[in-house]
Image (cartoon, rainbow, N blue to C red):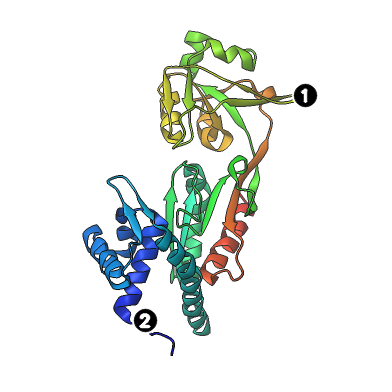
Amino acid sequence: MTPTVHGAEYAQLVAFVAVAEQAGFSRAAEALGVTPSALSQTIRALEERLGVQLLNRTTRSVATTPAGAALLERLRPAMAEIGDAVSGAARAGGRIAGTVRVHAARVAAERRVLPMLPAFHAAHPDVVIDLTADDAVVDPVAGGFDLAIRPGEVVEKDMIAVRLGGEHRQMPVATPGFIARHGRPETPEALTDFDCIRWRWRGRSLPYDWEFHRADGWFAVSVEGPLILDDRRLMLDACLAGIGIAFLTDEEAGPFLADGRLVAMLEPWCAPYPGFFLCYPRQRRMPPAMRAFIDALRAASVIV
């Protein structure tokens, strides 16, 4: 006879998967709508029932033990099957339901996701979009996300990548006041003589080199300056405050270029590049809520 998993035991397994995928109790507790202490007790009860330690806990991180990793590998497809069953029942009733967990670069969240949400919610009121907006480069699967929206240069090769919208450009920009005080560079290499506001990917230690294009291809310039940030919105604000030259996308700088608060420089060296991509892992059966969100996002991005 196949062992039966009762309600409390199933809840323990759901809790374990959440903690393992989020690599911590706080985010998992938030996702499940419980307190971290209650979630910790649930995991402890599961470990006692199974007679094996599933998680290694430190003050800074949580990771699966070999036994926990093996259990997680078996549970993930089972949980997906259950999700498919629930979604199938919802479809039979003429509606799509479920939660789609999205990780997006901040500007993509602002310019791609948020504008399409009102129409999407009107069409699919039972679908919840759980959106994390930051510029960190994360593994969507390890982070517990269904899909990610990120620049093409940081797309994993084993992911399905769907281009959203058209090409973009990055360009050095500064305020008219900064240019009046310090002048402007005549070539990309001359940027090393100016105060620049540098940016780095969140979670990485070195700033991002500024990339330009000429007849023989792309090349990078390592700039210097008084400020390094891991938040592109703060970089824009610092540039508007006159601290230095920033390297911004046309989407980020566009409104401020149009009203004269920023001035673009070195445009002949600023070639277009592929913009954002929607990335998700290959899977046999995509949940209907995820498919609906992808279709809506792609349709909205055609007109961006």
Q: Does residue 145 appear left or right of residue 188 in this picture?
A: left
Which residue is depicted at the point 49% across and 84% down? 93
Question: Is residue 34 shown to the viewer in this render?
Answer: no
Q: In the figure, 120 relative to 275: above or below? A: below
Q: Position of residue 127 (x, y in %)?
A: 45, 68
- Number of residues whose C-alpha sits closer than 10 Å to that of mark 2, classed few (under 14), some (14–19) or many (20 or more): few
- Number of residues whose C-alpha sits closer than 10 Å to that of mark 1, classed few (under 14), some (14–19) or many (20 or more): few
Which residue is depicted at the point 53% across and 52% down? 148
Q: Residue furthest bottom?
A: 1
Pick the front one: 34 or 300: 34
Secondary element under disc 2, as helix, strand or loop, is loop
Q: Position of residue 248 (x, y in %)?
A: 54, 30
Q: Residue furthest front?
A: 51
Front: mark 2 or 1: 2
Q: In the figure, 62 relative to 40: above or below? A: above
Question: Is residue 172 shown to the viewer in this render?
Answer: yes
Residue indicated by mark 2 = 5
Type of the residue with mark 2: Val
Which residue is depicted at the point 39% across and 58% down? 20
Sequence-wise, which precedes: disc 2 or disc 1?
Answer: 2
